[in-house]
Image (tube, rainbow, N blue to C red):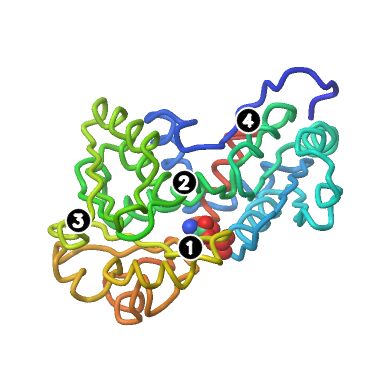
Amino acid sequence: MSGYDGPAMARHFLSVDDLDTPELSTLLDRSAAVKASPRDVADRLAGTAVAMIFEKPSTRTRVSFEVAISSTGGHPLALSSAELQLGRGETIEDTGRVLSRYVDAIVLRTFGQDRLEGLARTATVPIVNALSDLEHPCQCLADLLTIREHKGNLAGLVFAYVGDGNNVAHSLLLGGAKMGMAVRVATPPGYEPIPQVVERAAEIGRTTGGSVEVLHDPATACSGADVLYTDVWASMGQEAETAERARVFGPYRIDQAAVDLAKPDCIVLHCLPAHRGQEITDEVIDGPHSVVWDQAENRLHTQKALLLWLMDRD
Ligand code: CP
Ligand code: NVA
């Protein structure tokens, strides 16, 4: 914990792009080690406190972070913005200044990426993006670990994301490209991932052997894929668009026909929560290709490894 309000020196995790390929690879190795031997890290965060601020709902992120912190000896504080002075207009920057005097890291789930950046500007402790409108980098760590566990490697895999070009898609584009995967994203016209992320992922891919393709045909994306991935059609904050999106996204679902187009040994991921019958069918999420529960579990292990690394306690 810093004793002064000087320039932020801490390492943050606001985007998958905050890690280079060797760091990402090492973090996945450490996550696997933590998963294999959780007792080895049981007291590694002893004497620390981590604040988690949620400006949107959460099941997996909140519980997995809380357990990750407490089971490594740290003290988690789960806070909703409504019960903080943030809800009454205190700035995120001032919140960062103050919380840095009490805690050793801050986890934030929010809307705009600018709120995470504002917090990182003034906080003197590591800041973790627990989902923003732009990215969901912690989810991506668990996704990559899960794929690696089931496929043995990441480089060269054909990864097909079908659905909305959203926060989850953005982090997967960056993470997949960093790990040398061929990332295909199929969205309805008008719902593509933002060009800055696509261009950055393509740039990364040129150095790792990975590649990026943005398509509008879900069947082309799924054909011959090793990994199929989908997410909700309407993200948190887009509730008013739910009906319109349900109309537009109909063909952008992972159903048995999509699985049949992929490789026979393909795996299916979904960050959850799932809207069964919309972006994924019961048959697929409950079927033999689905690894979604392993994927959800891996949030716990990857976040332990992430916190130990950010807090310099590996
Ligand atoms: N996947 C995920 O982040 O789930 P929660 O919204 O439940 O945290
Ligand atoms: N794209 C979804 C992910 C939920 C974990 C959302 O932002 O709501």
Distance Cα–Cα, label 2 vs label 4: 17 Å
Distance Cα–Cα, label 3 vs label 1: 24 Å
- N-terminal-most mark, 2 or 4: 2
Residue in the picture at 55% in, 55% down: 300
Is residue 32 visible in the rendered image? The answer is no
- Viewer-side residue, 144 vs 177: 177
Q: Looking at the picture, which amino acid does disc 1 mark?
A: Ala
Distance Cα–Cα, label 3 vs label 2: 33 Å
Residue 253: quadrant of the picture: bottom left
Q: Which residue is mark 4?
A: 312
Distance Cα–Cα, label 4 vs label 3: 40 Å
Element type where label 2 sits in the image: helix
Q: Residues within 10 Å of mark 1 (few under 14, many from 20)?
A: many
Q: Which residue is mark 2?
A: 33
Q: Looking at the picture, which amino acid does disc 2 mark?
A: Ala
Residue 75 as seen in the image, left or right of residue 240: right
Q: Which residue is mark 1?
A: 296
Residue 221 numbered mark, or none: 3
Q: Quadrant of the C terminus?
A: top right
Q: Residues within 10 Å of mark 2 (few under 14, many from 20)?
A: some
CB atoms of marks 4 and 3 within 8 Å: no
User: Mark 3 or 2, which is nearer the eye?
Assistant: 3
Q: Quadrant of the N terminus?
A: top right
